[in-house]
Amino acid sequence: MRYDTILILDFGSQYTQLIARRIRELDIYSEIVPFNTPLEKIREIAPKGIILSGSPASIYDKKAPMPDMGLFDLGVPVLGICYGMQIVAAKFGGRVEKGEHREYGFTELDIVEKDPLLKDLFEKEIVWMSHGDKLVKKPASFKTVAKTENSDFAVISNIEKKVWAIQFHPEVVHTKNGKVILDNFSTDICGARQNWTPESYIKVTVEEIRNRVGSERVLCAVSGGVDSTVASVLIARAIGDKLTCVFVDNGLLRLNEEKKVMAMFKKLGIKVTMIKAAEGFLKKLKGVTDPEKKRKIIGNYFIELFEKHAKKLGHFEFLAQGTLYPDLIESVSVNGPSAMIKSHHNVGGLPEKMEMKLIEPLKFLFKDEVREIGKKLGLSQDTLWRQPFPGPGLAVRILGDITKQRTVILKKADDIILEEIKKAGLYYKIWQSFGVLLPVKTVGVMGDLRTYENVIALRAVDSKDGMTAEWVKLPYDLLNSISSRVINEVKGVNRVVYDISNKPPATIEWE
């Protein structure tokens, strides 16, 4: 089966991934490629439509990212968003200048002309702006469809040339009917079929894995998290006992996590061998406080362990991982001039260092899509809605030096946090909730004694895909229960604080 594709050219916008998500929510496959993808490659993909993303750049910059302008001659509809509008202006004779006032946040859009892109919208809509430049002269062949107080050309179009451009961001939730706009473009204007469904994905992926693997064997790294579990079940459906799963107990897991993981896979009927390597990881991490170094050390040691274990088990042609789309985009600027935020151990050089080909059946999926696929594969709610846990484990939640004593403190505190949140019936309603051990000590009083002990930071956030997140307003009585229990039951802690930062500007994890 070939999916109809809406192709997104990434010019470095923080919202590029959201465009892809919104299109997929319409059951239409979307794919992100770098802004400078050769025209021949775009022809090979044969997209039904093309979207030009936003960018932190300006079209008048000397090194402004520019696509092959031949994309406008392919005969497929093109939608330029924000910076994408500047590209349209550059192609067709418009002019962009730096605005006197930066337009950021909620803005009222006035629709002045009927257009298929804005079908089923009200004459006035609330949209989300984020730009400092503005179109001051529209291309002569384009008509003005909508405007705002600060933008005379907030939406322009040339139906004959199949080109549309908008100043605001329809992909963010703040644009009330943004999804309607993307639906109008993808289905009505581009005519894309809505055949990107969990059922079709499972069918196509299982067939692809089966054909690619053939008679060879696959080694799959599993952690017990949603991603690696869904990946392993998907691969097992394709190749059966030619799959060998390996679970590493790195000593940086949640309290008793290793026992729970092994029991879960046994119930799923997938054979998993466990490598006990807690002491080895702690030894490698001794004295290391830099978060990037921690991630690299953990990633490299994983490679070392898997190489040794794979040799003991015989020849493996393939290594499987549960890498997701957000992992890729946050690890390195793979699709455009985006800033690197942090590295992930499962995308940090594994293919180059290991003598195995990589299978990543989920690498172009978002978390909610993975859960939908897992549900169709028959996985339980407990498995699918288990809160995300970072690949490097508690190493990125223990700020500063990692020692056995500090891991024991955080494991116990984190276990209490999750127990109380589950007791309050909030576990499945929160994206992530956990404790962080800070590299500071504070004065406290216990009984008649003065203490000088550790601080635990409580973090709870809501998110749909991990790209953005808002801190959760936990009830005061729950915060009180968590704080009281952690301080009273975890030796070495005398203070609990609550993190009330959103992503962005903060990240979900502290490291």
Image: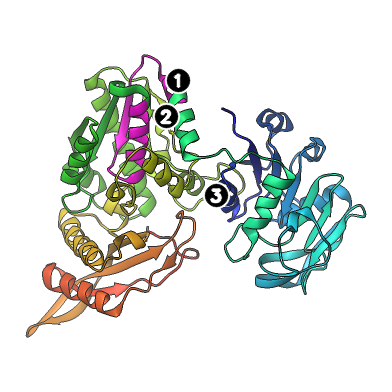
Query: Which residue shows up at 71% across the image and 58% down it?
Result: 82
The reply to whether discs 2 and 1 touch (Cβ–Cβ < 8 Å) is yes
Earlier-in-chain disc, 3 versus 2: 3
The mark found on residue 158 in the picture is none
Q: Which mark is residue 25?
A: 3
Q: Which circle marks residue 212 in the picture?
A: 1
Residue 183 included in the magenta stretch of the image: no
Residue 288 in view, yes or no: no
- The quadrant holding residue 347 is top left
The secondary structure type at the circle numbered 3 is helix
Q: What residue do we see at 42% from left, 29% from top?
A: 359
Task: Confirm or deny contact between disc 3 and disc 2 (CB under 8 A).
Answer: no
Name the residue rendered at 36%, 14% in the picture. Answer: 215
Q: Left or right: where does residue 330 sit relative to residue 430?
A: right
Locate the C terminus and report the quarter of the image it occupies. bottom left
**For the residue carrying disc 3, how many other residues have a C-alpha within 10 Å: few (<14), some (14-19), or many (20+)?**
some
Q: Position of residue 191 (x, y in %)?
A: 70, 41
Q: Position of residue 102 (x, y in %)?
A: 71, 71
Q: Split into 4 quadrants, where in the image is the N terminus?
A: top right
Identify the mark nearer the N-term, 3 or 1: 3
Between 249 and 8, the residue placed more toward the observer is 8
Q: Earlier in the sequence, mark 2 or mark 1?
A: 1
Work out how far the residue at label 3 is from the one at label 1, CA to CA, in angstroms: 29 Å
Magenta range is 208-237
Dot 1, crowdedness within 10 Å: few (<14), some or many (≥20)? few
Q: Residue furthest front?
A: 120
> Magenta stretch mostly in which secondary structure?
helix
State yes or no: residue 232 in magenta.
yes
Q: Which mark is residue 359?
A: 2
Which amino acid type is marked by label 2? Ile
The type of residue carrying mark 1 is Arg
Residue at 23% from the left image edge and 49% from the top image edge: 252
